[in-house]
Image (cartoon, grey):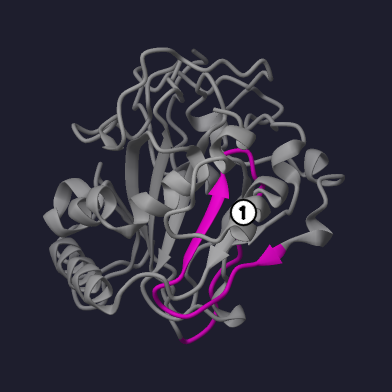
Amino acid sequence: MTPEDILSHPPRVLTQAQREHFFREGYVLAESVIPETWLARLRAARDELVERSRHLTDTDSVFDLEPGHRPEAPRLRRVTNPSVQNPDVWEFASQSILADIVADLVGPNVKFLDTMLNFKWPGGGEEVKWHQDVPYFPHTNYALLTAGVFLEDVGPEQAPMAVVPGSHEGPIHDLYDENGDWTGTIADMALAGAGLEKAVHLTGPAGSVQVHSCRTLHGSARNDSDKGRPVLLATYSAADAFPYVPYPAWSEQTFTIVRGEPARMAHLDPRPCPIPPNWRLGKGYQSIFTWQQREDTARRPDRA
């Protein structure tokens, strides 16, 4: 569906002005829209996952550990697909108001892709370098987005996510370095003219939802404050968007239709997109932190 088609449907949660802002700027922030009952359940899920990580000594396919993680002071960077690990997270991602917010922005037929639980621990929670999401998982069109739910209040001192307004209408940048190795981040030379000086930092109270387009340039700094910044991320697409490479964070929940009906025809966007590595080769997909921090120097997957 085109933006005009999507906007022709009555909004479920967002205002029409918020929807228009998303299509114009590539992001939107809806403050305090998640009910407190859901926040309590999501915080309990977060705490349960942190407890499960205490005994781990190395990053695995679910738990991505910060350097210095230890049983008495766990420091997770990310939990991959917490919706698989905890039924409350899956119920929230598939059945709550969040999917209605997504339907306001991709159309009434919504496909679920994955969830991530990102932590920015106090005193050094790691940065996420500038990137766009879609080079990780190119689809037949760009009606893909990620919604981030603030589990706690997010202020400017906690290294909130920054977005570059309007960058979704610009080029999609390559995420390989000069040697052809995948890094998951945009090279400094390309960033020089990318409009970072216009970046907007997304802050708000717990229960707020930030949503950004898969084409939007975004990142976040290291968190050196004394407050953590846990955010539950959920990625969705329009039902008529189909991947043309293996999906990197696939689970049995991936491609579930959570609103409306499955598509019977793909919508094709003529704008090209760079191809990521073939995630089925080598060690496969690893978290964005592993790629960006160059923690794995073993053979990287080849291009698809």
Range covered by the magenta-colored residues: 200-226
216 sits to left or right of 289: right
Q: Position of residue 271 (x, y in %)?
A: 69, 20
Q: Residue at x 52, y 15 (%)?
A: 303
Q: Residue at x 40, y 40 (%)?
A: 236
Instruction: Report the residue marked by disc 1.
Output: 27
Q: Residue at x 50, y 31 (%)?
A: 136
Residue 51, by quadrant, is bottom left
In the picture as drawn, the residue positioned furthest to the bottom comes out as: 226
Type of secondary structure dominating the magenta stretch: loop
Q: Position of residue 232 (x, y in %)?
A: 36, 60
User: Which quarter of the rendering shows the N terminus?
Assistant: top right
In the picture as drawn, the residue positioned furthest to the right comes out as: 193
Residue 219, by quadrant, is bottom right
Q: Position of residue 123 (x, y in %)?
A: 48, 79
Residue 72, by quadrant, is bottom left
Task: Please say if 128 is above or below 109.
Answer: below
- Residue 141 appears in the figure: yes
Depth check, front residue: 132 or 209: 209
Q: Is 217 part of what is drawn in magenta?
A: yes
Marks counted in the figure total 1
Q: Amino acid at mark 1?
A: Tyr
Task: Please say if 205 is above or below 125.
Answer: below
139 sits to left or right of 152: right
Task: Please say if 63 is above or below 134.
Answer: below
Q: Secondary structure at mark 1?
A: strand
Depth check, front residue: 39 or 178: 39
